[in-house]
Image: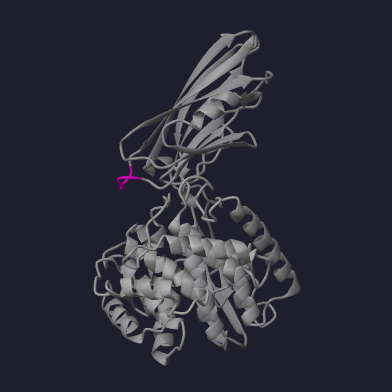
Amino acid sequence: MAINTYILHYLRKTNQLCKETKKKGLNLLITGYQKQLTYMDKAYAFSTFGSGEGNTWLTAFVMVTFYKARSFIYIDPKIREEARKWLECQQLNDGCFKVSGKLYNHKIRGGVPDQVTVSAYVTAAFLEMNIPPHNPVVMRSLSCLKRNIYDHSNTYTTALLAYVFRLAGDQEAHSKLLHHLDSVAIREGDLQYWCLTPKHKASSLCVEISSYVLLARLTGSVSERDLSCSSRIIRWLVTQQSYYGGFESSQDMAVAIKAMTLYSSMVKNRGSTSVTLTSPIDHLSFQVNEQNKLVYQGLLLQDLKGKYWLKAEGTSCTAVQVTLLYNVPASAVVCSFSVEVEVVIHNCCHERLVTLKLKSLYKGDHSVTNMVVLDIEIPSGFCPVPESLWNLRKEVLVNYVEYQKDHVFVYLKELHKDIAVFHELELIQEYEVQHLRQSTVAIYDYYCPSTNGGTTTPSATFTGSSTAAARTISLTATPNMTTIITMATTRTNAMMEPSNCHIATRHKVISDSDII
């Protein structure tokens, strides 16, 4: 919902919001608004599953998103105001805000759950809602934050603080924070970005930090130096976009799109550009102009061998992206997650009762994971026993269980490294199915879509990534209707389109497809 709101604001501000795009965007906002309300408790605080302790960070995020979306759709003002009151009640005596509720994505807030970082986020939300800096609650929180502007131990917090004090109009604090950020910036040619440390590998966290620096540069009065530095950050952010124009996670994409739309709305970009790519057997050309600049254009290259020449002529800013897709051998994949399944068959009362005993294990680089999902595909002819689903909700680390479209999804709060977790699920056979195909149990990190494990037919390759794993369960009906259980373990691999290359152009850094 937040990303759609930023894009709609950008398109409207730049007079590019056509009727069809607006209709699509409004429908998405209405759906997002209704869905967000299911995560609200009686105190108007928001949490990951709509139950348990209210979440300070999440409530601030939803509150400011509703505030920005109100210019497009109806948002009940009481919800926003009550959420604000709840947040104000979380303020401590020193002016900072209490860290309340659990976040299941450790990358949100930069993985730093301290009061200063959370307080900076809440304060930014208040200021973005045009609550003035002299408001008593905001004034106290700014005072708390100002006591920490010389603590540069975490680059994420420093970047967020720079943005907060730019919103508050405190030029002195803002300049000091930007001066430090400039000293730790990572520069590669005409690219500039920030990570937790200069040696830190570029990741979604780097995207989020760099986006906050960009927001700190472009909010309020903007100088030529701000624009010059911002263009280097934008160039780097574009290199981090995926084939579809998004980023690694929903959180870094929200902050990045927010910063990129702000930059794009400030930079005049009129005219047209002709882009031509030539290779020994290919000659591709793109025309980007005022009429099609929001349209994503892409073509396939016929041969990967040889040299390529890229030529651009024109007066507008156009982004060109070349994407190579390839297969990764399963033997080269190292899984961070694993799931083992023991199938126990019970014969009772002429019914087939099957118990799945699952063992989930994380063996990656971190001490603890984000929220983890067990995706259990239910074989044809079977369904989960209702009482077993209810009991599963009470088992260790289980936060939520849902059954839909022949899949049982078990949401685990987290997994600790090298500590196995065990769960059970009972299935009952309602009717017999011959030539039953394999079913799959997959385990993956909820906040990293690229780690999704997939289910296919036995003869196909599993799809997923290096940090997902899947266990195949084959329940095959023999001629005498006796159920035979066969087990097969398959590591998932990054399966993509084989041996082709795709080239595409984007006008500016925003395309209409980003609203989808």
Image quadrant for the C terminus? bottom right
Identify which residue is drawn at 64% across, 70% down: 70
Q: Position of residue 207 (x, y in %)?
A: 41, 66
In the picture shown, does residue 38 fall above or below 186? above
Q: Which residues are the magenta region?
A: 364-368
- Does residue 483 appear in the picture of this structure? yes
Q: How is the image coloured?
A: one colour
Identify which residue is drawn at 63% across, 59% down: 33
Determine which quarter of the picture holds residue 92: bottom left
Q: Position of residue 218 (x, y in %)?
A: 45, 82
Identify which residue is drawn at 60% across, 77% down: 10
Image quadrant for the N terminus? bottom right
Choose between 490 and 156: the one closer to the eye: 156
In the picture shown, does residue 312 fall above or below 91? below
Was residue 367 drawn as part of the magenta stretch in this picture?
A: yes
Q: Main secondary structure of the magenta part?
A: loop
Q: Is residue 191 left or right of residue 48?
A: left
Residue furthest bottom in the image: 224
- Does residue 244 appear in the picture of this structure? no
